[in-house]
Image (tube, rainbow, N blue to C red):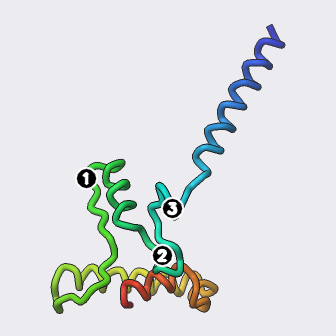
Amino acid sequence: MLPLLLLLNVLLGQLNVAKRKEKSIRRTTGKGGNYRKTKSGAGMTKKGVKAYRKKNPGSKLKTAVTGKVKKGSKAAKRRKSYCARSAGQMKKFPKAAKNPNSRLRQARKRWKC
């Protein structure tokens, strides 16, 4: 009975390891990529937002506000809110704040903060 239980535990352990390995692979660019490269401004792509909303019905996730906006418009308010939140991240992570090539700095640049 004991060897059978040990065998069962080993098999279940291997299944769990396989599941963890499968989840740990996350592509950011290329086929199936949902995130921009750091140099192109970090953040999610349109495709990535669409995929996220498909997995999470009712989500209100949107892409970055990158163009010109009218003062006081919804887009302008979203930008102002993002810039305020990311400014807090700059304080929390001073190492990223000092590096002009960090994802945080590149995303803020893309959002025109």
Q: Quadrant of residue 78?
A: bottom left
Q: Residue at x 66, y 31 (%)?
A: 15
- In this image, 67 relative to 15: left or right? left
| Residue type indicated by callout 2 | Ala
Q: Nearer the viewer, mark 3 or mark 1?
A: 3
Task: Give the mark nearer the N terminus: 2 vs 1.
Answer: 2
- Disc 1 is placed on an element classified as loop
Q: Residue at x 33, y 50 (%)?
A: 56
Circle number at residue 58: 1
Q: Nearer the viewer, mark 2 or mark 3?
A: 3
- Disc 3 is placed on an element classified as loop
Q: Residue at x 47, y 55 (%)?
A: 32
Q: Nearer the viewer, mark 2 or mark 1?
A: 2
**Residue 36 at what x, y percent from top left?**
47, 71
Contact flag, marks 2 and 3 (Cβ < 8 Å): no
> Image height check: is 69 above or below 13?
below
Contact flag, marks 3 and 1 (Cβ < 8 Å): no
> Image height check: is 105 above or below 34?
below
Mark 3 residue crowding within 10 angstroms, few (<14) / some (14–19) / many (20+): few
Circle number at residue 30: 3
> Image height check: is 86 above or below 46?
below
Q: Which residue is mark 2?
A: 42
| Residue type indicated by callout 3 | Gly
**Residue 12 at what x, y percent from top left?**
68, 26
Mark 1 residue crowding within 10 angstroms, few (<14) / some (14–19) / many (20+): few
The C terminus lies in quadrant: bottom left
> Image height check: is 67 above or below 19?
below
Q: How many angstroms separate mark 3 from mark 1 (CA)?
A: 27 Å
Circle number at residue 36: none
| Residue type indicated by callout 1 | Gly
